[in-house]
Image (spheres, rainbow, N blue to C red):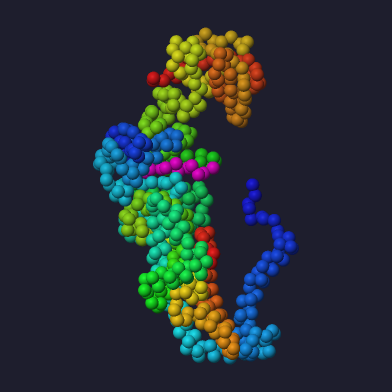
């Protein structure tokens, strides 16, 4: 990496409207060179459109996209120094794995010997050495995913775009690929821009995450900051469990009816008879349901005076095992109460 | 979850029914082959009084049979070419664009093969009459092309629908311009569908008789030759030899089309 602070991709007031539908609406942000950047949001929030604007499959209806300082408006996908890993992989079914990986090099007229050597090398990096002669149809979903990654990376793009690349894989494989993707990104040092609707993926891999909603960015921050200090109720709810508190209870806790939130693992769950600590914020309720999850247990507590909170307790100790219908006391440290900008 | 090759084994009743179906369909074909070799030249008596290979010589010496075969091959080949071009273009347009009345146009493209051949034949004949076109080689080709287009169209559009639209984007993303994308991605993906559609169109045209009867005038394609020959009192086995020729020439392309599209589960042919 030449300079950690140089900008790989920048959006300046970028909009992409389809008639009255504002898929992307006046969005501005910078992605740093070498960064693992996630665009997180529900479907239809504009994150994929932003990716396609960078790849060149879409043109902005307003504003400008720049890649490494160069305005790319009007430049077709094949003249941009970015490559994409597609959601359904889009491997060429009539070519072997090696031909797929070497496609970009073949188009750029790299001599055959060098092309094959680089493709083989890249297959090695994604742990698919020896699979070069197979057809995509002879591979498993996880293997196809790796071929798609190799096919994009072999061209040494300055930016790699990944469009929900793990969406079609099962949970175990997805977690394994998250670790590998992160490792590969560190090794090649290329900027990764990763689109996902899975908050777990975004948090586990990214240096920074932009949370999209209705074509705009709600918040852009590091995973920890996003989780611990969400700026809006939407971000709090989309990244983690929302646990929204409003109305009278919010007023008692904060003095205003503005909704607030507290993360489930920050809440202490005690029998009702135990006195609450003086520095904590306390509410009472009854257990309305219990979800045993192995490593931890999720309790849903119906609060006195309405509302519900989810509490997540690690199954470290069994000194207190509340059962459904038990009266309990919840408390948390005041600093863990999350307030949102109005 | 079970790995689903393990379907229940068929009972004897179902097996017997399946075999009955296969025999019902194919025994008549065996008789055609058998009667190529009979020594009886007037009727099809069973069992044949004796066996001979004489009829192959007689048939091959007939100039009118060679002429009919030649005409059929030429008509089939040119109909296939027309169908390949028009069928592919139609499929590409139908796949790529959405427009008002699209469903209707799709139906109209499929109509020649859905309608009874006799309706297609009559309407073509009426159309040629109206246009003052005398029957010729080209009216025959036009007639055949109408239903040949459909099989090419079906094969190509099935392949297009099964191809991921992201393939084109992937190719562009990897640096290929439109022309390179067409040459390296689109065409190779369509190739087997085109070949299969072409083979089927060829086979379909080669043994077609209904539309042919209405559009041929007094030209004899091989199927028409056979039909006329059947009504003659002697040298009956010559028609069987001609029929076997039709079988051999159409069977090859159909088998090839089947193997070409087997892996991709395309709808290779459709009825008719």
Q: Is residue A164 magenta?
A: yes
Q: Count of labels shown?
A: 0
Viewer-closest of B114 and A191: B114
- Could you tell me if residue A38 is visible in this image? no
Tell me the residue at 68%/89% (across/down).
B49
Q: Quadrant of residue A60?
A: top left
Q: Is residue A276 left or right of residue A212?
A: right
The quadrant the C terminus of chain A occupies is top left
Residue B178 lies, with reference to residue A29, above or below; the image says: below
Viewer-closest of A122 and A271: A271
Viewer-closest of B254 and B207: B207
Position in image of residue B225 (x %, y %): 51, 82
Q: Quadrant of residue B76?
A: bottom left
Q: Quadrant of residue B218?
A: bottom left
Viewer-closest of B99 and A66: B99
Residue at the far right: name it: B12
Q: Is residue B215 magenta?
A: no
Tell me the residue at 45%/32% (across/down).
A203
- Could you tell me if residue A329 is visible in this image? yes
Position in image of residue A178 (x %, y %): 47, 39
Position in image of residue B158 (x %, y %): 47, 58
Residue at the far front: name it: B130
Position in image of residue A317 (x %, y %): 62, 23
Magenta part of the protein: which range? A159-170
Residue B228 lies, with reference to residue A158, above or below; the image says: below
The quadrant the N terminus of chain A occupies is top left
Tell me the residue at 35%/39% (across/down).
A18
Residue A63 lies, with reference to residue B146, above or below; the image says: above
Tell me the residue at 39%/40% (across/down).
A48
């Amino acid at each position: 990496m030449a300079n950690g602070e140089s900008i790989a991709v920048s959006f300046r007031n970028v909009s992409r409207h389809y008639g009255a539908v504002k898929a992307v609406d006046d969005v501005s942000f910078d992605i740093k060179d070498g960064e693992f950047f996630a665009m997180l949001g529900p479907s239809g929030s504009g994150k994929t459109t932003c990716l396609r604007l960078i790849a060149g499959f879409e043109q902005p209806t307003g504003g400008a996209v720049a890649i490494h300082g160069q305005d790319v408006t009007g430049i077709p996908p094949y003249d941009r120094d970015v490559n994409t890993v597609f959601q359904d992989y889009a491997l060429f079914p009539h070519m072997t794995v090696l031909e797929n990986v070497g496609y970009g090099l073949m188009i750029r007229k790299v001599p055959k010997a060098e092309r094959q050597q680089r493709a083989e090398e890249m297959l090695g990096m994604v742990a698919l050495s020896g699979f070069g002669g197979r057809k995509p149809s002879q591979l498993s979903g996880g293997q196809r995913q790796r071929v798609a990654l190799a096919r994009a990376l072999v061209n040494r793009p300055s930016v790699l775009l990944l469009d929900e690349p793990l969406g079609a894989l099962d949970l175990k494989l997805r977690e394994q690929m998250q670790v590998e993707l992160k490792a590969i990104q560190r090794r090649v040092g290329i900027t990764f821009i990763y689109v996902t609707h899975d908050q777990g993926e975004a948090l586990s891999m990214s240096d920074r995450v932009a949370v999209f909603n209705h074509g705009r960015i709600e918040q852009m921050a590091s995973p920890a900051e996003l989780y611990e200090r969400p700026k809006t109720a939407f971000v709090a709810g989309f990244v983690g469990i929302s646990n929204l508190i409003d109305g009278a209870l919010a007023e008692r806790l904060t003095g205003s009816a503005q909704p607030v939130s507290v993360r489930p693992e920050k809440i202490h769950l005690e029998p009702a008879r135990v006195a609450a600590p003086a520095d904590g914020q306390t509410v009472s309720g009854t257990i309305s349901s219990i979800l045993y999850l192995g490593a931890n247990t999720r309790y849903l507590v119906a609060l006195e005076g309405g509302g519900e909170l989810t509490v997540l307790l690690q199954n470290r100790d069994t000194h207190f095992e509340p059962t459904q219908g038990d009266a309990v006391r919840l408390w948390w440290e005041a600093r863990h109460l999350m307030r949102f900008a109005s | 979850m079970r790995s689903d090759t393990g379907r229940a084994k068929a009972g004897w009743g179902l097996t017997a029914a399946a075999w009955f179906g296969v025999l019902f369909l194919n025994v008549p074909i065996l008789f055609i082959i058998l009667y190529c070799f009979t020594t009886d030249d007037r009727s099809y008596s069973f069992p044949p009084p004796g066996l001979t290979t004489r009829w192959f010589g007689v048939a091959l010496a007939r100039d009118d049979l060679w002429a009919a075969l030649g005409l059929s091959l030429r008509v089939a080949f040119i109909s296939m070419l027309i169908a390949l071009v028009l069928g592919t273009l139609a499929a590409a347009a139908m796949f790529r664009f959405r427009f008002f009345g699209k469903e209707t146009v799709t139906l109209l493209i499929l109509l020649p093969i859905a309608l009874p051949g006799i309706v297609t034949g009559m309407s073509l004949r009426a159309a040629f009459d109206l246009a003052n076109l005398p029957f010729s080689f080209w009216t025959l080709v036009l007639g055949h092309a109408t239903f040949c287009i459909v099989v090419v169209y079906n094969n190509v559009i099935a392949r297009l629908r099964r191809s991921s639209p992201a393939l084109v984007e992937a190719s562009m993303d990897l640096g290929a311009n439109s022309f390179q994308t067409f040459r390296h991605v689109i065409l190779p993906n369509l190739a087997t569908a085109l070949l299969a559609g072409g083979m089927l169109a060829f086979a379909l045209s080669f043994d077609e008789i209904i539309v042919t009867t209405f559009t041929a005038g007094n030209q004899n394609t091989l199927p028409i030759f056979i039909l006329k020959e059947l009504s003659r009192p002697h040298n009956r086995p010559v028609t069987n030899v001609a029929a076997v020729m039709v079988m051999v020439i159409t069977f090859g392309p159909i088998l090839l089309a089947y193997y070409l599209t087997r892996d991709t589960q395309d709808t290779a042919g459709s009825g008719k």
